[in-house]
Image (tube, rainbow, N blue to C red):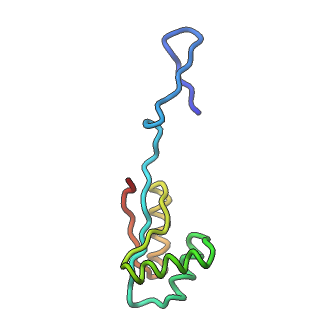
Amino acid sequence: MAVYASTKPGAITVPDRKAMHVPRYKVLLHNDDHNSMEHVVGSLIRVFRFEQKICQKIMLEAHDRGVALCTIEPLEQAEHHRDQLLSFSLIATIEAAE
């Protein structure tokens, strides 16, 4: 935790938690008709290192609903994971989490 100087000698202040909030982003997997279900699951395992059952659930949600949430994380990491999914020929996007 950062410590900031105060106007009073010997006093310290703690920063507001809202000021320290790091914006988070959703990594979304979109359904496509070009990749096999096995390829999608294997790609998710390699990118996120999730267990196979979790990756199957994400894949099926994208297949059934058209899009599935993979994870929520800081922007730089979300961009990296999106780019990795794209490198496996999957359709992925990021959007701001609320």
> Residue 51: percent from the left, percent from the top?
63, 74
Q: Residue at x 43, y 36 (%)?
A: 19
Measured along the vertical axis of the image, is residue 73 above or below residue 87?
above
Determine the image quadrant of residue 25.
bottom left
For the N terminus, give its image quadrant.
top right
Measured along the vertical axis of the image, is residue 5 above or below residue 84?
above
> Residue 67: percent from the left, percent from the top?
38, 75
Q: Residue at x 38, y 69 (%)?
A: 93
Say how many tags the image has.
Answer: 0
> Residue 86: percent from the left, percent from the top?
44, 76
Q: Nearest the camera: 28 or 43?
A: 28
Q: Nearest the camera: 72 or 82?
A: 72
Measured along the vertical axis of the image, is residue 9 above or below residue 55?
above
Q: Residue at x 36, y 79 (%)?
A: 66
Is 48 on the left-hand or right-hand side of 93?
right
Determine the image quadrant of residue 53.
bottom right
> Residue 13: percent from the left, percent from the top?
53, 22
Residue that protrudes farthest toward the top in the picture: 9
Is 89 on the left-hand or right-hand side of 44?
left
Measured along the vertical axis of the image, is residue 87 above or below residue 11?
below
Q: Nearest the camera: 79 or 29?
A: 29
Q: Nearest the camera: 63 or 30?
A: 63
Q: Residue at x 44, y 66 (%)?
A: 27
Determine the image quadrant of residue 64.
bottom left
